[in-house]
Amino acid sequence: MKPKLDILIVDDDQRMTRTLMDILTLAGHNVVEAHSGPRALEKVQAQMFDCVLTDVRMPGMDGVELHRHLRAAQPGLPVILMTAFAADSLTRQGLEEGVVGVLDKPLDVSHLLSFLTSLGRNRTITIVDDDPVFCHTLEDVLCKRGFVVTKITDPHAELDAITAEAEVILLDMKLNGINGLNVLKNIRAQHPDLPVLLVTGYRDEMASAIQGALEIDAFACLYKPLEIPQLLQLLGEFQTNHLRKLLKST
């Protein structure tokens, strides 16, 4: 079954939004349209989206400025710019500030649909932590932001169970007597490029293990109690880098 996404289309050209809305709805997605930046922000305040497609040049608030507001309202939300103009300073600025990519108008619909299918399949986060309360709480936070969450609370779980379907792993560094560094080494042996984000409540005790993990390409380490905005920012960086590769390859 193809993944169903909640998509926001933003363009002051109502014919454009209506046409694109019809196409994406027929493809099985839930689509909402807005005809200005401020109206789009109202939509984002009312519901969570998996992706935003926005025109670059719009009266009042352009697509890059809209992206700045969206990033504050829903950290990690993938934003794609649409433009009928050649690459210019505005689109380059958007890419520097974290938009996933730029699509030229008229849109290549097959390319867009392929990308959206990939997007729907690449939002799975695996939490590896032996504290079930922590896992459940974090799962609630992430699910509300559109992620699919897998929880591994058994520190003796097989590597295949930990890495199956995962696009990002949140790995606790102290798993009921098992050092998270050893788990990471096993992950790296089979999945050298799989993003792994460390978490721990033992900053001093685990300092040496954390340093060792960072040296084998753990992305960063967050300390409990987690700062959720910081976590979402890091996940947004993972996702943006990954989706840029997808957008270029699909």
Image (cartoon, grey):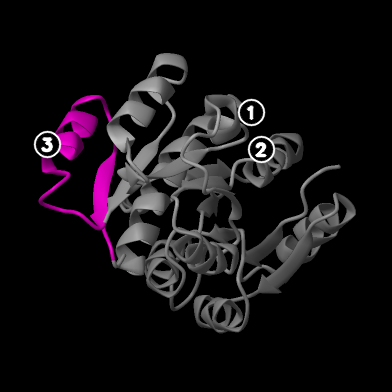
Packing grade of label 2 (10 A; few <14, some 14-19, many >=20) is some
> Label 1: how many residues lie within 10 Å, few (<14), some (14-19) or many (20+)?
some
- The quadrant of the picture occupied by the N terminus is top right
* Residue displayed at 46% across by 63% down: 63
Q: Judge left or right: residue 137 versus residue 21.
A: left
Asked if residue 210 lies in the magenta stretch, the reply is: yes
Badge 3: how crowded within 10 Å, few (<14), some, or many (20+)?
Answer: few
Residue at x 59% of width, y 63% of height: 143
Looking at the picture, tell me which residue is in the foreground, 19 or 226. 226
Q: Which residues are magenta?
A: 201-224
Query: Earlier along the polypeptide chain: callout 3 or callout 2?
Result: 2
Q: Which residue is mark 2?
A: 118
Direction from residue 217 to residue 133 in the image, left or right: right
Q: CA distance from mark 3 to mark 2?
A: 37 Å
The type of residue carrying mark 1 is Thr
Which labelled disc corresponds to residue 208?
Answer: 3
- In this figure, what is the number of numbered marks? 3
Q: Residue at x 77, y 54 (%)?
A: 4
Q: Residue furthest right?
A: 26
Task: Name the residue beneath numbered marker 1.
Answer: 250
